[in-house]
Image (spheres, rainbow, N blue to C red):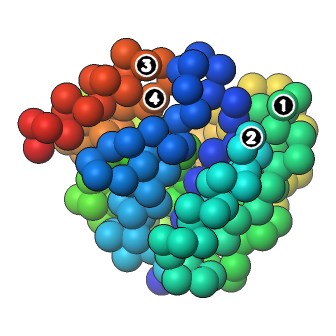
Amino acid sequence: MCINGLIPAAGLSSRMGEFKPLLPLRGKTVIENTIDSMLIAGVSQIVLVTGYRAEDVERLVRSRYIENTVICIRNPLYESTDMITSIKTGLHAMPDCDAFFLLPGDMPIVLKDTYLAVYRKMTESGKAVIFPEINGKRKHPPLIRSSFIEKILDFTGQGGLRELWKYHEEEIDGVSVDDTGCRIDLDTYEQYLHCIDRCLEQ
């Protein structure tokens, strides 16, 4: 299977108080950690959706990654829309693949083993969407078959993807993982500091 990645990172970082993607973490930036977690797991290409301070993020990506490894696409409506708009924007630019991992840009420490467990589950189950699960609760990053892309693009309801999944439960499965990185997203500065502490423990 050819597996790609989609990373929405267009937001204003308003709750954080600082610009999340470029905060330092493990000797690089948060967004580099998020991207690298996918690449280490064997993802072929990544679509990164930018918005706020797009030029700063894209300059970093151009300096750090081989051309076309990370494809930057902008969500021009980032100030007035939610994440599903960024996801749709990214899907319009997604290169051909069998499936793609979806991971918000502020989840930088997902383990390689999690990606691999989700991938193996998809090859075994044949389902369209596979989530990593912790204590039975769905977490990021799900792996989504490309055959499901049109359903995401066509969805116009409220509630984003969380609501969309409710209409397609028969196409969804999960696999249990032991990964703190699936719990950590950097909405606040306190969560960022906690993430640093977790990295020091690894």
Q: Position of residue 57 (x, y in %)?
A: 62, 54
Task: Tell me the amino acid under the disc marked 4.
Answer: Leu
Question: Distance between the Cα atoms at labels 2 and 1?
Answer: 8 Å
Q: Is residue 105 left or right of residue 200?
A: right
Question: Distance between the Cα atoms at labels 1 and 4?
Answer: 19 Å
Q: Is residue 160 left or right of residue 81?
A: left
Residue designated by label 3: 189
Question: Distance between the Cα atoms at labels 3 and 1?
Answer: 21 Å
Residue designated by label 4: 186
82 over 175 or under it: above or below = above
CB contact under 8 Å: marks 4 and 3: no
Residue designated by label 2: 52
Q: Position of residue 124 (x, y in %)?
A: 36, 69
CB contact under 8 Å: marks 2 and 1: yes
Crowd rating for badge 4 (residues with CA inside 10 Å; few <14, some 14–19, many 20+): many
Give the residue drawn at x 36%, y 60%.
37
Q: Earlier in the sequence, mark 2 or mark 1?
A: 2
- Quarter of the picture containing the C terminus is top left
